[in-house]
Image (cartoon, rainbow, N blue to C red):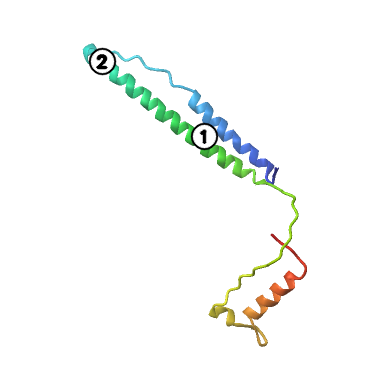
Amino acid sequence: MLFDNPLGWYSFIAVGVLVISYLIKPKPLDIKIPSVRFLMHEKGTRQKSTFFQRFITNLLFLLQLLALGALAFATTLPIISMTYDSTGEHTVIVLDVSNSMNTEVSAGQTRLDKAKNIAENNLKGQVSI
């Protein structure tokens, strides 16, 4: 696999920045609340919701990491070259035959005639896939 834009590898720095930003956790603040009874009652449900929120956060992180990694990889412009034998038995050419192709380009020659001539000249003994 070849890469047409080697400078695109620098875009993976953004992936590193994303990972570092998720690894840095803010320092928790100690806040005194006079209602201890309220906190004791909600302690069990708070742990469950924290786990769910953590799962969602990790899921969002994984999606962001996947998207940013795909974009960073796309900036390198990967090229896959394959060698194989090619033989063409039939060649199909698609031409536009709308009214606009009946416009004369030069003396007595329409766009359609010109397109046919170009197609015939390009097909002589060549195989393209």
The first of marks 1 and 2 along the sequence is 2
Residue sitting at x 28%, y 16%: 43
**Crowding near pointer 2: few (<14 within 10 Å), some, many (20+)?**
few
Q: Is residue 56 left or right of residue 103?
A: left
Residue sitting at x 76%, y 71%: 124
Residue sitting at x 25%, y 15%: 39
Nearest the camera: 48 or 40? 48
As displayed, is residue 51 above or below residue 121? above
Q: Quadrant of residue 16?
A: top right
Q: Which mark is residue 39?
A: 2
**Crowding near pointer 1: few (<14 within 10 Å), some, many (20+)?**
some
Nearest the camera: 26 or 111? 111
Q: Residue furthest right?
A: 125
Q: Secondary structure at mark 2?
A: helix
Badge 1 amino acid: Leu
Nearest the camera: 87 or 67? 87
Quarter of the image for the C terminus: give it.
bottom right
Q: Is residue 39 left or right of residue 101?
A: left
Badge 2 amino acid: Leu
The percent coordinates of residue 31 (x first, y second) are 31, 15
Q: Which mark is residue 65?
A: 1
As displayed, is residue 44 above or below residue 129? above
Whether tag 1 and tag 2 are in contact, CB under 8 A, the answer is no
Q: CA distance from mark 1 to mark 2?
A: 36 Å
The percent coordinates of residue 54 (x first, y second) are 40, 25
